[in-house]
Structures are given as structure tokens and as C-alpha cells.
Image (tube, rainbow, N blue to C red):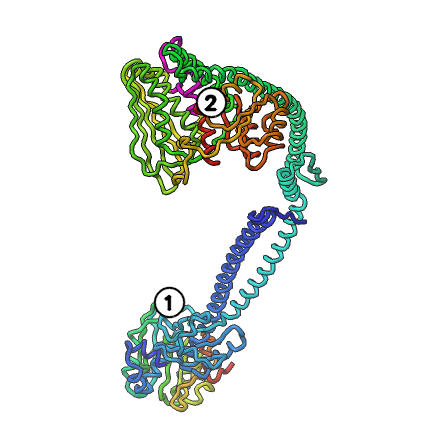
């Protein structure tokens, strides 16, 4: 039985590792023992051979004393030849006192008595022949040590066989042990791996019949652990289900609340802005009416300014609501930075005159004044910053510095500094100025607004991947630094924003659709000089009938109408040469999406100023 | 034998030794017999080891030189046999060119004494002489008669018997 690891990078199995280690150790041990035995046997055999040779040499030498004494060399030769009977003796040399060979015997053709080389290939002993304390000769015997080597070789082969047998026995025992014990551990690992990969906690390890108590305990513990995990998992699933139900319920509540909030905001916006449209429109008309007296025009301005403030307040609340609901999106368009600065100057110069403050606008010459970005939001950011500066400054000046830093051929950074000489921000409040509902001034009662401008500003800057930071000194003023990345673009072929109505050749017939009669009247008065005919409708039904009866080129329609949405006109009766402009006090994400879907390019926020309406009508007239 | 002479003659060169006369060989043999023959009670007596030489000639210097040696701690004494010599005191009695009758007479005189008799005549063993030196082909060979030796208690080494050309038992 083999356990194969599923991990391709895993090393050898536990069995192979254990067997390899034990095999190597066993073989090393057995080889060491064998080497010692062989070495000992070699030394012992050599000693025995040398002892035997020595004894033989002593015996023969003793017999040769008379021979050497009386120079009976024939007898010496006969005595030496006796050695032939011993197979171990390779050769024998009998030397006289001058080491001259007296007689010799050799079994092979090699002359041992002259060639000392053979001394190293054989076992050699020498025995001096002494007569009356005189050395009369020397006997040298050469024994065959090859026999010992062969004996040792046989012994080595024998031991090798024993080692192989031992190893085979070891392998069998190890396999038996593995099947009995280690296999259980391997199966444990396999089950753990299956659990980790499949997440199936119902798997259990069967207790083997023959196993040690440690393995059994391990299996038992693992099974208990799995029981606990399965139980906990089951309980956890129940809890998760309960929590999920709760969360789903909470989510539905939140969604319902959010929907209610959106509906409320839409209703609030509509109900507040719609009357403001009439108030602002009439106030502006009064201000610009040449027949009105100066006092009447000033009252008109006051009404318009206050209505504008309420309008901004509502706009900020709506913007914040959009931001919090995550429905805010950037609407990119090409615009000229210089024109944006000019609009800001036009907007704030009257305020600076009113508050007797100096407004300094330093617009450095720009290499690429045409950029692509959400101009409306950028203008709102700068509006908010300048508005804050004017609110918090009683004396001195407000300064706006704008410069462009070209990053690449396609991108630039718009760097803006808005500085004032106002009261400054306490250091402990600097970090909180971009929070919602936080006002900069030290006295909250005297401050106008609810503290949403900077919060919205920060959200817009983050949305544009820009940066804004503030540097302030209490009593000396505050500087906001703004960095916005913008795409560089070329000047469009025709810029209609600043095109004034210079002798229009054709004035369009305009249909105004709104359920608010005041709004219709205001629009009529604003457009009277720019339309051939103006028709009014208070519902979609009336509008459709007029569209069928009359040849109308431009339709200004409110979105919230008694019998439907203004978009329905675009859906059903609009022709290719007709232009539709939608008006609403509340443009949420859905309405903006619908505008894009229907291809509606123009929209007017309520309450609107005369300029807002005229800017749109001028564009359409000039295009036609 | 040359080896022996080398030891006896203070490391004389072998080539020089080979040129020595028969006296040299005989003197060396006589001394060398002392290594292969055991005399009864030799170690218990305090007498010198007497080598007697019976010869009609003057005693050669080679034999006188033996007196410088010793046998088992006893000083070797070499004497020329004459009428006054007590033959039974001799350990070795060497007959060198001795007349036959005189040789037989003196052999009879020591026949019961532990005296190693050595002779050069061809019938020396037949006359109950113990060691007979034979000259053959410029070699000296031995013939040993063990009977008289055993009778007087002399023990002759097997090594010596091995080299003997003839052993009479």
C-alpha cells in the first residue's frame, strides 16, 4: 500500500525517508562491523601464518645448524626441499653468513632470493642459524599471502551476503511496521489533506485493528476534533443564517429608508426650489427692470441674494446626500481655465464690493488653458473656498492664485491658492474643518450656513484624485491649497458659451412645459427676445397635443409633471430636428443616467437665473 | 666450515680462508665437535677442556690456536700426546697420522672413558674410533660410530649425525 502525496513539490514519502535513513545507517553499521571483522581476521591470519612460518623456520634452522657447520650443502638442499610438502611455502632461501645464497627452493619461476620485490607480496620470515653464538647462516621463508587474501575476499563476500540478507529482513520488517503503524499516520495526513481541500468535516479515520496506543489516541483525538469542528460549523452556519436574515432585513430597511430619504429630498428640493425659481426670477427681472426705481431694484437684489443663499443651502444638502449615497459622478467636459477664473471674478467682485474687501485674482499665463474635467464641480470647489474666505474675513483682502503645471503632453496640474486675512483657524480645529457640519468661525451663531461647503469640497477633490490642504494662522488668515489633475486638450473649433446673440437669422419656436405657472411666466419673460413663438403646457398631454399641432423646435420641460416625467416627451414625440432641455430642482443619479440614455444634452437646475436660461438658449439658437 | 673459520679467524676474508691447509679444517672440526657432542659431567668438573692430539709431527699452529677458545665456560687446552699424557683426561683425542699399532693401543686405553676419539685412517671406525674424518674430492666428510660413543656416555647431536656420511649404530 502506498500513500502518494498530492503536492507536486512534496518530498519523498515518510516510508521512503524512514527506510532510506535506516537502510543507510544499517549498511554503514554493518560495513563498519564487517570492516573491523575483516581487518581483525586479516591481522589474525597474518599473525597465525607468521607464527607458523616462524616455528617452521626455527625447526628447520635448528636442523640446519650441523649442515651449515659442516658445509654439507647437499644435505641443506634436501632439507630445504622438504618444504615443498607445504603448499603455503612459496620459496625458501638459505644464506651463509655473508648473505650468499647457499641453497634455495621456489615453487614458481620467480627467484625470490634475489628479487626483494616479492617480499611485499608474500609473508616473509627469516631465522638466523647460530652455532656457538656465531651466525653461520640465515633461512628466509616466503609464504603465500594470496591465500589469506582470497580467504578474506570470500569472507567479505560472505559478509556482503549477510548484510544483504539483513537488509532484506530489515526491509520486510520495516514494511510490516509501516503497514501496521506508519500507514495509520499516513492515512491521518491524507484525511487531513482531504478535509483541508474539500472542507468535508464528515470524514473520519477508522481505528486500525493493530496499532500502538499512541496512534490509536491520535486517531481518536483527530476524530473528536472533527466532531467538534463539525458541531461548531453547524452551529456557526445557524448563527450565520440568522445574522444573514437579520442583515437582509436591516438592508431592506436601510434601502427603504434610503429610498424614502431620496424621495423626501426630491420632494423637498422640488417644493423648495420651485417657489425659489419664481422668487429669484422675478427678483432678477425687478433688478434689471429699467422702469423700476433704484430702491425697487435694490430690494430686488436683496430678494435675489437671499433666495440664492437658500438655493445654495439646499444644493449643498442635496450634494452631501448624493455623496453619502455614493451616487456622485464626474461629468467631464472641455473648458477653459481662464473663463472659469473670469466667471469666479464676476461672481465675487460684487460681494467684495459689498463687504468692502479687496479681491485679488492672480491668474498666471497658461500654456494649455483648455482642459478636460468636471467644470461644474471645480467651479463649486473654488466657489466654496472663496465663499468661506469672504465669510471669515472682515478686513483686508481675499486672494485667488491660479497656475498651471504641465506634467506631460496629456496631463497638467491645476494649482490654486485661496488666501484670506480673516480670523484664521485654531490649530486644534484644522484637522476637523473638512468634516460635515463644521464651521470655520469662532462664533457659530454669527456664521452663515451649516458648515457643509468644505466637507463637499473635500469629497469632490477626493473624487477627482486631487489634494487639498490648509495652512492657517490664528488672527492672520488662512490659505487653502488645491491641486487637481486634469487632462490637457486643444481649444474646440467653436465655443458657443460666450457667443452672444448677434443678429440671429432664425428664432426658434419654443414649447415650455411646467406645472408651475409662475415658472412658465418667468421663462416666457426671459425668452421672449429669443423665440419666434412661445407655447406653454402644464402637462405631458398638453405638450404632446401642441407638438402635434405646431412646428416646435425647442422644448423646455420640467421633469416632475402631473401625468408623468418630462423624459416621456423625448421618448415618444421628439423628432430629429427638435431639441429638448429638461429642468428639475433635483437631478439624482437615475435622472442623469436617463438623460445620457435619451441623448439629452441640456439641463437647467431649478432655481435658475436668467443667465442660466439664456446661456442654453443662445447655444441652441447659434447652432441652428 | 668456511663460516666457522670466519668466526674463528677473526673475520678473515673467505678467499683467504679457502687457501688454508688441511690443518685448518681439522682444527675447526675438532672445535666444532664441542657444539654437537655432550660429555657426561662436563659442567660439574672444574678441569680445563683438554684436546689431545696424537701426531708424529710437530703440532701445527692451527691446533695451538684452539687454546684461545672456550667450551661451556671451560678454557680449551691443547696438548700433544706423549708417553706421559693421561689420556682419560682428554675430552677429544685426535689421531693425526698416528701409527696403527700405537693408535689401537691408545684407543684401547680410553675405550671406557668419555673421550671423543677422532681419526683420519680409513679403518678408524672399525677400530672402535668414534669419528672418522674422510678426505674425498677436496671435501671432509664424517663417519660416526655410535657404539663406542654410547658405551662411554657421549651424546652426539642429530645435526651432526645428519651431516655424517655414515653412521654406525
Which quarter of the picture shows residue A252?
Answer: top right
Residue A442 highlighted magenta (yes or no): yes
Crowdedness of circle 2 by 10 Å Cα count: few (<14), some, many (20+)? some
| Chain of the residue displaying label 2 | A
Is B42 left, or right, of A574 in this rendering? left
In percent of width and height, residue B58 lies at: 28, 86
Is A132 left, or right, of A234 in this rendering? left
Q: Which residues are magenta?
A: A431-458
- Depth check: B68 or A613 in front? A613
Residue B118 highlighted magenta (yes or no): no
- Depth check: A400 or B34 in front? A400
Which quarter of the picture shows residue A283?
Answer: top left
User: Residue drawn 40% across and 91% down?
Assistant: B137
Q: Is residue B79 visible?
A: yes
Which residue lies under the disc numbered 1? B45
Marks 2 and 1: same chain? no
Is A251 left, or right, of A521 in this rendering? right
| Chain of the residue displaying label 1 | B
Q: Which mark is residue A86?
A: none
In percent of width and height, residue A524 lies at: 50, 22
User: Please, is residue B1 above or below residue A456 in the view?
Assistant: below
Which residue lies under the disc numbered 2? A526
Distance in Å between CA atoms under marks 2 and 1:
177 Å
In percent of width and height, residue A552 lies at: 56, 31
Asked whether the residues under the numbered discs 2 and 1 touch, taking CB atoms below 8 Å apart as contact, a structural biologist would say no
User: Residue drawn 65% across and 29% down?
Assistant: A233
User: Please, is residue A604 above or below residue B72 in the view?
Assistant: above
Is A393 left, or right, of A111 in this rendering? left
Amino acid at each position: 500500500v502506498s500513500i502518494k502525496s498530492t503536492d507536486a513539490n512534496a518530498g519523498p514519502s515518510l516510508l521512503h525517508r524512514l527506510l532510506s535513513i535506516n537502510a543507510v545507517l544499517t549498511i554503514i553499521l554493518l560495513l563498519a562491523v564487517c570492516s573491523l571483522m575483516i581487518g581483525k581476521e586479516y591481522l589474525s591470519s597474518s599473525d597465525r601464518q607468521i607464527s607458523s612460518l616462524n616455528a617452521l623456520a626455527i625447526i628447520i634452522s635448528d636442523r640446519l645448524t650441523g649442515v651449515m657447520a659442516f658445509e654439507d650443502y647437499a644435505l641443506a638442499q634436501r632439507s630445504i626441499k622438504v618444504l615443498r610438502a607445504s603448499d603455503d611455502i612459496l620459496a625458501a632461501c638459505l644464506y651463509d653468513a655473508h648473505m650468499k645464497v647457499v641453497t634455495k627452493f621456489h615453487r614458481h619461476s620467480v627467484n625470490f632470493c634475489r628479487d626483494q620485490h616479492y617480499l611485499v607480496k608474500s609473508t616473509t620470515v627469516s631465522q638466523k642459524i647460530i652455532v656457538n653464538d656465531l651466525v653461520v647462516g640465515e633461512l628466509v621463508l616466503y609464504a603465500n599471502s594470496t591465500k589469506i587474501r582470497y580467504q578474506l575476499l570470500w569472507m567479505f563476500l560472505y559478509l556482503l551476503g549477510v548484510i544483504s540478507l539483513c537488509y532484506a529482513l530489515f526491509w520486510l520488517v520495516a514494511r510490516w511496521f509501516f503497514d501496521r503503524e506508519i500507514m495509520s499516520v499516513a492515512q491521518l495526513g491524507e484525511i487531513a489533506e482531504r478535509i483541508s481541500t474539500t472542507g468535508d468535516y464528515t470524514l473520519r479515520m477508522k481505528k486500525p485493528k493493530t496499532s500502538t496506543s499512541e496512534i490509536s489516541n491520535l486517531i481518536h483525538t483527530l476524530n473528536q476534533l472533527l466532531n467538534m469542528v463539525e458541531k461548531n460549523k453547524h452551529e456557526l452556519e445557524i448563527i450565520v443564517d440568522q445574522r444573514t436574515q437579520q442583515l437582509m432585513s436591516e438592508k431592506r430597511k436601510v434601502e427603504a429608508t434610503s429610498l424614502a430619504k431620496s424621495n423626501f429630498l426630491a420632494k423637498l428640493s422640488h417644493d423648495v426650489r420651485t417657489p425659489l425659481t419664481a422668487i429669484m426670477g422675478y427678483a432678477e427681472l425687478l433688478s434689471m427692470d429699467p422702469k423700476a426705481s433704484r430702491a425697487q431694484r435694490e430690494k430686488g437684489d436683496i430678494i435675489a441674494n437671499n433666495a440664492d443663499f437658500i438655493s445654495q443651502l439646499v444644493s449643498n444638502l442635496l450634494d452631501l446626500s448624493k455623496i453619502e449615497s455614493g451616487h456622485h459622478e464626474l461629468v467631464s467636459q472641455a473648458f477653459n481655465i481662464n473663463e472659469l477664473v473670469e466667471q469666479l471674478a464676476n461672481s465675487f467682485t460684487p460681494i467684495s464690493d459689498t463687504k468692502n474687501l479687496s479681491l485679488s485674482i492672480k491668474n498666471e499665463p497658461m500654456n494649455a488653458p483648455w482642459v478636460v474635467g468636471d467644470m461644474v464641480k471645480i467651479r463649486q470647489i473654488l466657489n466654496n473656498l472663496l465663499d468661506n474666505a469672504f465669510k471669515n474675513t472682515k478686513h483686508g483682502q481675499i486672494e485667488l492664485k491660479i497656475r498651471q503645471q504641465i506634467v506631460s503632453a496629456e496631463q497638467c496640474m491645476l494649482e490654486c491658492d485661496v488666501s484670506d486675512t480673516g480670523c484664521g483657524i485654531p490649530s486644534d480645529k484644522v484637522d476637523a474643518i473638512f468634516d460635515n457640519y463644521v464651521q470655520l468661525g469662532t462664533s457659530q451663531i454669527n456664521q452663515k450656513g451649516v458648515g457643509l461647503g468644505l466637507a463637499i469640497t473635500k469629497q469632490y477633490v477626493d473624487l477627482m484624485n486631487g489634494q487639498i490642504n490648509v495652512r492657517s494662522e490664528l488672527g492672520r488668515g488662512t490659505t487653502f491649497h488645491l491641486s487637481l489633475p486634469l487632462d490637457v486638450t486643444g481649444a474646440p473649433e467653436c465655443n458657443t458659451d460666450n457667443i452672444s446673440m448677434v443678429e440671429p437669422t432664425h428664432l426658434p419656436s419654443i414649447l415650455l412645459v411646467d406645472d408651475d405657472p409662475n415658472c412658465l411666466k418667468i421663462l416666457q419673460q426671459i425668452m421672449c427676445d429669443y423665440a419666434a413663438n412661445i407655447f406653454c403646457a402644464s402637462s405631458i398631454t398638453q405638450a404632446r397635443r401642441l407638438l402635434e399641432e405646431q412646428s416646435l423646435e425647442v422644448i423646455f420641460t420640467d421633469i416632475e409633471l402631473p401625468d408623468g416625467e418630462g423624459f416621456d416627451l423625448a421618448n415618444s414625440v421628439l423628432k430629429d430636428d427638435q431639441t429638448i432641455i429638461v429642468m428639475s430642482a433635483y437631478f439624482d443619479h437615475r435622472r442623469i443616467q436617463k438623460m445620457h440614455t435619451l441623448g439629452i444634452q441640456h439641463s437647467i437646475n431649478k432655481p435658475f437665473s436668467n443667465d442660466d436660461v439664456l446661456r442654453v438658449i443662445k447655444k441652441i439658437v447659434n447652432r441652428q | 666450515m668456511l663460516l666457522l673459520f670466519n668466526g674463528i679467524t677473526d673475520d678473515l676474508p673467505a678467499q683467504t680462508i679457502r687457501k688454508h691447509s688441511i690443518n685448518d679444517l681439522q682444527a675447526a672440526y675438532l672445535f666444532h665437535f664441542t657444539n654437537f657432542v655432550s660429555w657426561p659431567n662436563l659442567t660439574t668438573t672444574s678441569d680445563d677442556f683438554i684436546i689431545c692430539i696424537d701426531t708424529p709431527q710437530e703440532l701445527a699452529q692451527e691446533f695451538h690456536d684452539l687454546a684461545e677458545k672456550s667450551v661451556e665456560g671451560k678454557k680449551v687446552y691443547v696438548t700433544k700426546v706423549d708417553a706421559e699424557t693421561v689420556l682419560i683426561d682428554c675430552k677429544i683425542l685426535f689421531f693425526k697420522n698416528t701409527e696403527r699399532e700405537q693408535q689401537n693401543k691408545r684407543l684401547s686405553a680410553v675405550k671406557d672413558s668419555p673421550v671423543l676419539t677422532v681419526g683420519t685412517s680409513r679403518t678408524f671406525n672399525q677400530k672402535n674410533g668414534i669419528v672418522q674424518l674422510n678426505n674425498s674430492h677436496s671435501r671432509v666428510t664424517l663417519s660416526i660410530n655410535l657404539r663406542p660413543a654410547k658405551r662411554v656416555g657421549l651424546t652426539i647431536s642429530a645435526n651432526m649425525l645428519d651431516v655424517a656420511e655414515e653412521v654406525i649404530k
